[in-house]
Image (cartoon, rainbow, N blue to C red):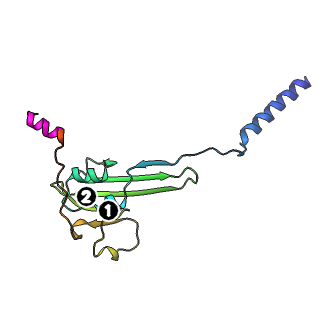
Amino acid sequence: MTLSRFARLTFLVAAFCGCSSVPRIVSEYKIDVQQGNVLTQDMVSQLRPGLTKDQVRFILGTPVLMDMFHANRWEYVYRLQKGSTGAVEMRKFSVFFDASDKLVSVSGDVMAAQAADASAVPESRTREIDLGSIAVDSVAPPLEEKGFFGKMRESVGF
């Protein structure tokens, strides 16, 4: 009888000790988790007032959020969680269109081409830039031209 009690006691102590802590002799590898749209400064600096929604989608990619209640606003969200440190980097970028679906302004963590009054903004991470105040160096890029197969379909009548 004492042997069975001793066996049960040993089993319970081993079970509690085994579940209480895990020795970190070998640490597991944790990957970096990246979600959303990666927006670079080069991509955002290509935005000009008057671009269509298709042109903006071509430059920045498909937005993460296209709200049906705010049809004239697209949201681009980016989140990166480092696996080694657990640090989270988050960026938000919004694109605003007018009633005729032309680009009007942008706001967010990534800045568009610098306007004359943009340097007067305090150092907050998020700000809104009216693209009409930016000097336009070039004309908006033309709509996509039809490729070889598009021209062939058009000549056939499709």
Camera-nearest residue between 137 and 38: 137
The spot of residue 98 in percent (x, y) is 19, 58
Comparing 16 with 74, the one in front is 74
The residue at the point 53 percent across, 52 percent down is 82
Q: Is residue 72 magenta?
A: no
Residue drawn at 19 percent across, 49 percent down: 144
- Secondary structure category for the residue under label 2: strand
Q: Is residue 105 left or right of residue 22?
A: left
Q: Quadrant of residue 137?
A: bottom left
Who comes first in sequence, dot 2 or dot 1?
Answer: 2
Q: Are marks 2 and 1 in contact (CB under 8 Å)?
A: yes
Q: Position of residue 156 (x, y in %)?
A: 9, 33
The quadrant of the picture occupied by the N terminus is top right
Classify 10 Å Cα crowding around label 2: few (below 14), some (14-19), many (20 and above). many
Residue 107: numbered disc: 1
User: Viewed as shown, does residue 23 lie left or right of 75?
Assistant: right
Residue at which label 2 appears: 96
Residue interval drawn in magenta: 149-156
Q: Is residue 91 above or below residue 113?
A: above
- Residue type at numbered disc 2: Phe
